[in-house]
Image (cartoon, coloured by chain):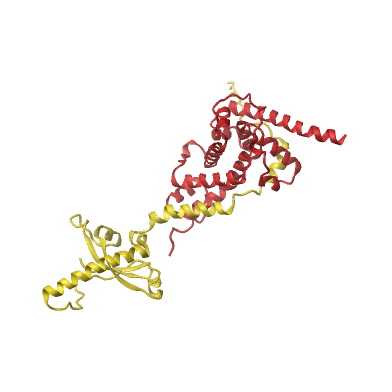
Amino acid sequence: MTTTAPPAPEPLLPPLRDPLFDNLRDGLAGQQAPAAVQHAVMAAFARQHGAARRPWWRRLGATGWGLAACGTGGLGAMALLLAVMMAGRPPGDDDAGRGDFIALDTVERIEQDPAPRMLATMVPRSSLAALGVAVSPDNAGDMVKAEMLVGADGSPLALRLASE
Amino acid sequence: MKPFPSAPTTPDSDSELLRQMHAGVAAAFEALYRRHQGPLYRFCLMRSSSAQIAADVVQETFIGLLTGAFKFDPLRGSLANFLFGVGRNLVMKQDKPSAQASRFDSDSDDDDDAPDAVCAAPTPLQRLLLNEQAEQVRLALATLPPHYRDVLILFELHERSYLDIAAICQLDIGTVRSRLSRGRAALGKRLAAWREPVNVALH
């Protein structure tokens, strides 16, 4: 039995490189894009993925939390005044109804913060699901009163619900 | 506090690095950048004869890869070829519109005698390339029509195959062969023209 050899494929390899280019190729070998380009693309990466990966309480930043605290603080003061006028007695220190703190950062970071402070704020209930708080479809759109432990640099450290 | 997941231990293939990049692993994107920026920068540098344009194109290419402005499809070729192709297109945008119209929109290869003024002014590259022959070749290359320059740079300096060049420049292999052959001939003519006065002066 005879076998027929398959036809040789057309060579795809190009001819040899022209040695005329050798010196130029060697001279170019060390050329790299400036370091500023790498900084720019890595900054673009941080912007693209950093913002998307940060949870909502980090995206707010110190200014956002400050504004939120001012707004809710003002509303809270008015509500407090109204409650005092209606009830005729000052509010007590009753913590009933308040939950435990939910850590938003590491314990070490919270413990080492030089000047943590507490801010009153309102948070969307739907965003609490990411923190392990049960959220039902019925009240997912509500806003919930909360207290935020904020570090000296404005970064959120822990969260406690002031109302369920 | 770590904004991104930790670096991959053994980043290997481009596709794996790309997957990690899309997952937000900064180290994977950095590894991709480090792997491909050099060749891309050198190609753009030779193609445009401008370090500034080359740097801008590298930056725009990688940011486009990151943001999805330039969509890479691994089924259509390698990432390296894709980046070269994007870089080439971006450099082409820097060329004069009239030159683009006459040189890129047509497949005619008969304008090899048309000089290109891309390299009329001294560039930072000229100061870097101390070798006289290399500088002569670079100057001759810079005066070639862009469609010859693309093929010659990719083949001679980046040692890309015909298939790679065809993919990068979106040409068929026959055209790549033709342009390489004509580009070499045109380059030879330009180098001969430059050498003549030198030889005459020596005699």
Query: What percent of the width, then of the height, locates residue A105?
Result: 37, 67
Q: Give the residue drawn at x 51%, y 56%.
A: B9
Residue A69 occupies quadrant: bottom left
Query: What percent of the width, then of the height, locates residue B141?
Result: 67, 35
Residue A58 occupies quadrant: bottom left
Q: Give the residue drawn at x 30%, y 59%.
A: A130
Q: Give the residue drawn at x 38%, y 58%.
A: A54
Q: Is A53 on the left-hand or right-hand side of B90?
A: left
Quarter the N terminus of chain B occupies: bottom left
Residue B69 occupies quadrant: top left
Given residues A104 and B110, the one toward you in this image is B110
Q: Is A121 on the left-hand or right-hand side of A38?
A: left
Q: Give the residue drawn at x 63%, y 28%.
A: B179
Residue B96 lies, with reference to residue A126, above or below; the image says above
Q: Is A125 on the left-hand or right-hand side of B40?
A: left
Given residues A56 and B121, the one toward you in this image is B121
The chain coloured red is B
